[in-house]
Image (cartoon, rainbow, N blue to C red):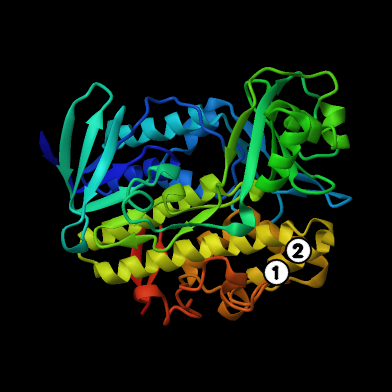
Amino acid sequence: MRERTQILIAGGGPGGATAATLLAQQGLEVTVLERDHFPRYHIGESLLPSLLPVLDSMGAREAVERHGFVRKTGAFYGWGGEEWSLGFDEPQRPAPYSFQVVRGEFDHLLLDHARSQGAVVREETSVRRVELPAGRATEATWTTQGGREGSTAFRYFVDASGRAGVLGARQLGARRFHDAFRNVAAWGYWRGAAPLPAAPQGAIGVFSLPEDGWLWAIPLHDGTLSVGLVTSKRSFNRARGQHGSIDAVYHQALEQSPHLTRILAHARLVTPVKVEGDYSYVSRTFCGEGYFLVGDAACFLDPLLSTGVHLAMYSGLLSAAAIGSTLRGEVEEDAARRFYQTAYRQAYERLLILVTAFYRIHDGRDTYFRKAQTLSRRDRAGTRLHESFLNIITGIEDVRDAREEAVDVLHSRLRGPLPGQPAHGLGGHATDQMFSLPTSRHHAPGGLFLELDPYPRLVPAR
């Protein structure tokens, strides 16, 4: 069975659904092949306010608001012996809140919305291989869970297949794991937990451990609290050897946090403990001839700052703008790819540096805020150090950079070494091939910048 479509998308998660919706709304022919049947379980429940303007662009915000997810109005940090809260309701935030979501339900809403906008969605269908004659993606073979096989030819392919990375990881071998973040996460869901004192409404709680790692606590609208541990693989394996099981390692870590001990005092764990490891990586390239890598298919960052869905939906938006503008003949493909590569990679790398700074656990809150300032293109008064930090962790910097001046983020500072790291390429974190970033509308990736109205598109910076 051989089919054709203008754009084929592998994966129906937030990145794939965002791209599918925005492309279908431009009148383009879009087919999404999703391996699973939705709703399906997924971790990554704490979202950033940056998703609200993207949901607005997609026309999906009303459905998400109506669903009843917990509104996340900020974050609470018990970190390195200090405590502080950050609220999202200060001026110039993209929105005063985001959501804490059950990902299976959130992702299902987005995929159904893509269907309603005209995208063809076929679940329980796995992309097996992408054909690359002369280096250009042209066709994909797939199989269904029922055993049916076929192929689909396309003009453009969007790999939104997540960590599986059907094209970027499996075929191209372009993925490199960050040695600095060879971590393990273990998590479960609790019922009957008390609210977190002194935290903004619906806030995520983030708590450092005395020696190695940190814990999260995320309230969900089904009445459960997602509680997770992140620590280095070395420490996790050592603790497992000492305590004898994953469950024992998990519970022993929770007991080290006075905050979690208090709020879980009368709660009970109602699910098995789940585990994932080695999940921070970046691809050598984020796009190529006829294809774009979106979301986790391109890169994934330690979940400390809850950036996973932000990066997925942001890259889904950028890919839709690049593909749509190219197909309409408004921009050259090479220029659109340069813009996408630079804009998406820059967003990832800024967050990479901030997470690295945060892992210097005992340096104190002002250290984190000052590090954020060096990564933010907007000067802030010394008494407002937290604003630069908020701009990054809420995602507004990425939207502004792409729209206003095509990602001008103080290139020399980004490439500077981190303390204790080699003096090249962002401290050696797989970023030596980073493109030069522009400093004005007259020096933008491919000479382009992003506009959202009436739909996402790339505009010459003249």
Q: Please say whether residue 204 is visible from this viewpoint.
A: no
According to the picture, the residue beneath numbered tag 2 turns out to be 369
According to the picture, the residue beneath numbered tag 1 turns out to be 373
Q: Is residue 443 above or below residue 263?
A: below
Q: Please say whether residue 185 is visible from this viewpoint.
A: yes
Q: Residue most toward the front?
A: 241
Which amino acid, by three-letter code, is at mark 1? Gln
Mark 1 touches mark 2? (CB < 8 Å) = yes
User: Whole-percent x and y of residue 304?
Assistant: 66, 48
Answer with left or right where residue 98 lies relative to residue 85: left
Q: Looking at this view, is 23 or 78 the one in front?
A: 78
User: Whole-percent x and y of residue 12?
Assistant: 37, 37
Q: Identify the residue at image location x=69%, y=64%.
A: 388
User: Whole-percent x and y of residue 51?
Assistant: 53, 46
**Which quarter of the figure is the N terminus placed in?**
top left
Q: Identify the residue at image location x=27%, y=49%.
A: 26
Answer with left or right where residue 88 lies relative to residue 136: right
Q: Name the image quarter holding residue 133.
A: bottom left
User: Whole-percent x and y of residue 60?
Assistant: 44, 38
Q: Looking at this view, is 54 or 134 the one in front?
A: 134
